[in-house]
């Protein structure tokens, strides 16, 4: 796996909000363009320093170059993405405020009753920004050398294996629950504030197992402190060709990659949605962004709005089944 200076990536997350600009702030847009004529705000519910936060900042540094306007990226954590979503909805619905979110966009309404907003009706999808293959990993000195050994121990010792989650209903949590549900095992879940703390505690021995995306786990992978037992992705990862997917291990319903997408409040014009989608798609092909994120295991996507809408519909069925069968609740 190619090395990346984590400090370079994290410089985007040292302050929130932070203004990411192409060239000088306040750069003028090209003649005749109706949007954007001023900075655009992107609110994310992910904490500073995690994979979702870094992906948003790297992507929108490139988007600012495409649109010739600053991008203001702000972290608003809490409430399983509800805080970030409300922050976006509280701003004028004029195409200058976007939400970067993940599976919480679909799962939060299933877990929280009497919400003050309606995620499905109040937001419209723009594009799938990135995907982050999941990893099932243990410390380098762990007793388990393979996924099969881990599962055999788990079946013989219910609730003994400790794993952490930084967000109820996020993809790592759904994958962990699906492994248990369809693999016939039971782990013990320990709640964390942010995902990087989980990676730290697996290496330190406070946890036995981590279900984290490659991006979040990158520092520990580069330091050779963890062992990957399986990945959640449609194929094996190029940088880890010997690590099987969960589908190969007999758990196709748990074989999912994490993802992040862009949403805008309902009512924003289709033209602005199209322009933002096109800007993210163009940014996804820029080496300055793609290569930096690829080095961490994050894959830029920039899908069409139609493809993202279909992707969300498919995920809705997946998450409803796992939440119902695993009895997930806040």
Image (cartoon, rainbow, N blue to C red):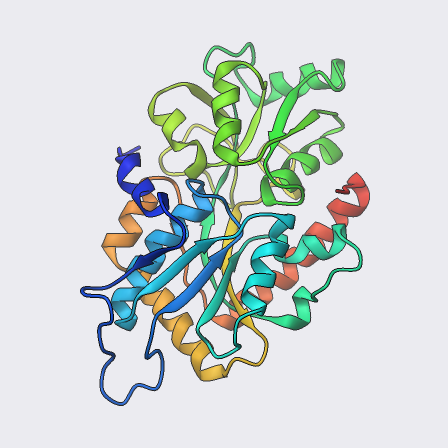
| Quadrant assignment for the N terminus | top left
Q: Is 315 on the left-hand or right-hand side of 323? A: left
Q: Which of these two is toward me, 34 or 189? A: 34
Q: How many marks?
A: 0
Q: Which of these two is toward me, 321 or 47? A: 47
Q: Is 254 on the left-hand or right-hand side of 201? A: right
Q: Position of residue 196 (x, y in %)?
A: 47, 32
Q: Where is residue 198 in the image (x, y as percent from the top left)?
A: 53, 28
For residue 219, above or below residue 109: above
Which residue is pictured at 75% across the width and 52% down the height? 112
Q: Quadrant of residue 6?
A: top left
Q: Position of residue 31 (x, y in %)?
A: 22, 87
For residue 195, above or below residue 43: above
For residue 301, above or below residue 255: below
Which residue is pictured at 50% across the width and 83% down the height? 269
| Quadrant assignment for the C terminus | top right
Q: Where is residue 209 in the image (x, y as percent from the top left)?
A: 58, 23
Which residue is pictured at 78% across the width and 39% down the height? 326
Residue occupying the far left of the picture: 23
Residue occupying the far bottom of the picture: 32
Which residue is pictured at 74% across the width and 14% down the height? 157
């Amino acid at each position: 796996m190619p090395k990346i200076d984590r400090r370079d990536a994290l410089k985007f997350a040292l302050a929130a909000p932070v203004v990411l600009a192409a060239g000088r702030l306040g750069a003028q847009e090209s003649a005749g363009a109706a949007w954007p004529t001023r900075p655009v705000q992107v609110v994310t519910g992910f904490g500073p320093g995690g994979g979702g936060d870094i992906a948003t900042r790297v992507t929108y540094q490139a988007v600012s170059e495409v649109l010739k306007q600053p991008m203001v990226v702000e972290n608003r954590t809490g409430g399983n993405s509800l805080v970030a979503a409300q922050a976006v909805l509280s701003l004028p619905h004029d195409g200058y405020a976007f939400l970067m979110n993940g599976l919480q966009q679909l799962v939060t309404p299933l877990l929280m009753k009497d919400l003050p907003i309606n995620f499905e009706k109040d937001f419209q999808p723009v594009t799938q920004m990135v995907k982050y293959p999941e990893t099932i990993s243990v410390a380098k000195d762990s007793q388990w050398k393979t996924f099969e050994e881990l599962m055999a121990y788990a079946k013989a010792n219910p609730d003994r294996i400790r794993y952490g989650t930084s967000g109820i209903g996020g993809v790592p949590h759904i994958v962990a629950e699906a492994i248990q549900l369809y693999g016939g095992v039971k782990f013990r879940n320990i709640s964390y504030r942010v995902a990087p703390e989980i990676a730290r505690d697996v290496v330190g021995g406070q946890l036995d197992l981590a279900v984290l995306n490659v991006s979040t786990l990158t520092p520990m992978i580069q330091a050779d402190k963890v062992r990957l037992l399986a990945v959640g992705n449609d194929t094996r990862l190029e940088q880890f060709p010997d690590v099987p997917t969960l589908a190969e291990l007999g758990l196709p319903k748990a074989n999912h990659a994490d993802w992040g997408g862009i949403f805008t409040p309902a009512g924003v014009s289709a033209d602005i949605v199209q322009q933002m989608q096109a800007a993210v798609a163009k940014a996804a092909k820029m080496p300055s962004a793609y290569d930096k994120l690829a080095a961490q295991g994050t894959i830029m996507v920039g899908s069409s709005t139609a493809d993202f809408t279909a992707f969300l519909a498919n995920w809705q069925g997946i998450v409803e089944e796992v939440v119902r069968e695993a009895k997930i609740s806040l």
